[in-house]
Amino acid sequence: MKTLLLITVVIIVLFLISQIYFIMAKTETQPYQVLKKEKDFEIRKYPPATMATISMDAKSYKELSSTGFRTLASFIFGGNQSKKNIAMTSPVHMDINSSQSSMSFVMPSEYTKDNLPKPDNSEIKIETTPEEYVAAVQFGGYANDEEIKKYAAQLETALKSKGIEYFGNFRFLGYNVPYQVLDRRNEIIVSIRWKE
């Protein structure tokens, strides 16, 4: 009985230590400037960023997340012409829709389209996104298709109530590794027309 209790305590302590590590780990995050905070969302300005993107026929988060992630992870973990490891950043961008969906990894700020090693997989496209203004809503826990639709609808309703014009698809941003259980961060963003 004492052995079982001791093993349980050790497992709990190791779990908590791992979760604290994931929360405290310093991963480069895509920069943005918060221009305005509303009750249910915020307005952000994103500067241009270098992204590695894979497009797929997936029509759901479930279909896109694992295959897309594995494909892009192979690129940053040496699947490129330089056989170079590229640091993981956050968030992972997903544009999920009924025709063709895409997943993008933001490249570390030291890279541009010109100095980033070329992917071995020709389906991975390297692009520089333009500066953009977005509305964003944040939620915790593990994301799934139902949660993504729920928060996209919530953001759409909030924007309409404020008379803010939006365009394009509502996109999902995921910030955490799958095995981080505590303090998870997810977001839905959509492009808006905004004048500072």
Image (tube, rainbow, N blue to C red):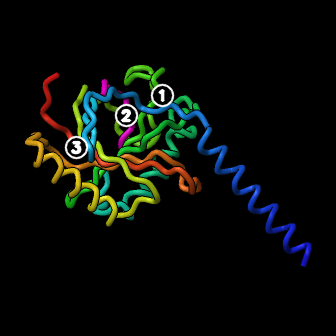
Q: Is residue 195 above or below residue 77?
A: above
Count of labels shown?
Answer: 3
Q: In which quarter of the view is residue 23 placed?
A: top right
Relative to 42, does residue 172 appear above or below in the rendering? below
> Residue type at mark 1?
Pro
**In the drawing, what numbered circle is on residue 190?**
3
Residue situated in front as seen by the camera: 72 or 44: 44
- Residue sitting at 69 percent across and 50 percent down? 18
Q: Which residue lies under the disc numbered 2?
A: 51
Q: Earlier in the sequence, mark 2 or mark 3?
A: 2
Residue shown at the point (57%, 40%) measured from the top left: 77
The residue stretch that appears in magenta: 46-54
Main secondary-structure element of the magenta-colored stretch: strand
Circle 1 sits on which residue? 108
- Few, some or many residues within 10 Å of mark 2 (<14, 14–19, 20+): many
Q: CA distance from mark 2 to mark 1?
A: 9 Å
Label 2: element kind: strand
Provide the secondary structure element on which disc 3 rests: strand
User: Is 37 left or right of 184, judged from the image as shown?
Assistant: left
